[in-house]
Amino acid sequence: MPVETSIWRIGEKVEKVPFVPLALESKLQQALEQNLSILDPGLMLVGKQVRTENNKFIDLLAIDPDGELHVIELKRDLTPRDVVAQALDYAAWVRKLGREEIAQLYADHHGGQSLAEGFLQTFDLPLPDVLNAAHNLIIVAAEIDPATERIVQYLVEYSVPINVVFFRHFKVGQDEYLVRSWLIDPDQVAQQAEQRPNNKKRQPWNKQDYYVAFGERSWRSWENAVQYGFVSAGGGRKYTRPLETLQPGRRVSVYIPKTGYVGVGIVTTSATPIKDFTFVVDGVPRTAKEMSFVASEALHDYDDPEQSEWLVGVDWQQVRPRTEALSGGHLFSNPTIVCQLRDESTLKALAEHFPKAFGDGEGADAAD
């Protein structure tokens, strides 16, 4: 079962915030249509109420930066078992969609805009050559019964990429909040799906390592990132949203374009606008405006979280000067800002170049 989530308000006394049942077919669907990052920061909406060949309608169809499709179904008034069967039925149709059909669906639901254009605007990446090499099923519910939970867990065990996400709706005065939890760790679902005998599209992920592209600009300096312990992105939510996939405890290998890999560290904080990020200097917490930056425009759009820099705290395990960066055409690199690092040869090279970060060096400082 998912972990039960409760919220307490701390004031003159501690009060539990009441859970308010949410009409999934209304507010939640609207929220998901407006911002799919509620589910996953790496999703772009292809269409809502997408008609299948059997004249049924998928609530939401999305695509991720790898070109994989995601079928998102709200439980509504269906019995739990029926919604699982319905999701599987939709998957049987979705798996047959080709590039032209996906592009047409997107155009139909976005006023004729091309899929390639929408993909570039959302992810700042060209549309992959291969689309729909795999697909994923997400059921959105307030709760499910034990039998349905067993069915979903069984399907995942046998490499069906299905999961259930639960939303709780809390209200405090005029403010409303959504709290999300998953039935099964999404990384576990992805890992199980990759074990299918016919899945040859990419190497498995170790559930630990991420690649981060760190583009240096007049508002972003590697020296500051090392000095203060962070990685960052800015200039729009399509650039900063990928940082939200980095959660504390994950390992990041940082790549400066046209230079190479320069550092490896462990994530310590979730993504935060620079205005809200806490810098710690000699044990003293400070705000960005109290800091000194090499990058002259580090505080650009300071009061605008849509455009400002967003930072993720990093405990650097080992860094190298640019002149000693790990580089070469055989190494993995990607124009996307954050992605899972799967390439085994790159991970092996990183372990050799940054031994302290990969457990092969002890008792030394992070910076060489």
Image (tube, rainbow, N blue to C red):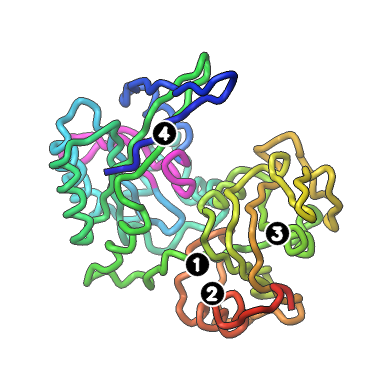
The amino acid on which the numbered mark 1 sits, given as a three-letter code, is Asp
Amino acid at circle 4: Leu
CB under 8 Å between discs 2 and 1: no
Mark 1 element type = strand
Q: Nearer the viewer, mark 3 or mark 4?
A: 3
Asked if disc 4 and disc 1 are in contact, CB closer than 8 Å, the reply is: no
Image check: 66 left or right of 142?
A: right
User: What residue is disc 4 on?
Assistant: 32
Mark 1 vs mark 3, CA separation in Å? 18 Å
- Left or right of residue 180, residue 52 in this image: left
Residue marked by disc 2: 332
Residue 132 vertical position relative to residue 142 in the rendered view, above or below: below
Quadrant hosting residue 362? bottom right
Residue 112 in picture, x, y percent from top left: 44, 38
Q: Which residue is mark 1?
A: 209
The answer to if 57 sits in the magenta stretch is yes
> Label 2, label 1: how many angstroms apart (C-alpha)?
13 Å
For image coordinates 74% across by 34% down, the residue present is 303
Q: What whole-number distance in Å separates the C-alpha atoms at marks 2 and 3?
A: 24 Å
**Three-letter residue code for mark 2:** Phe
Point out the stretch of residues depicted in magenta: 37-62
Q: Nearer the viewer, residue 74 or 19?
A: 19
Image coords of residue 138 (percent x, y): 30, 44
Kindly identify the residue that appears in the image at 31 percent across and 24 percent down. Answer: 25
**Residue 273 locus on image (x, y percent):** 67, 42
Which element carries disc 2, helix, strand or loop?
Answer: loop
Residue at figure coordinates x 34%, y 37% from the top left: 4
CA separation in Å, label 2 and label 4? 33 Å
| Residue 226 colored in magenta in the image | no
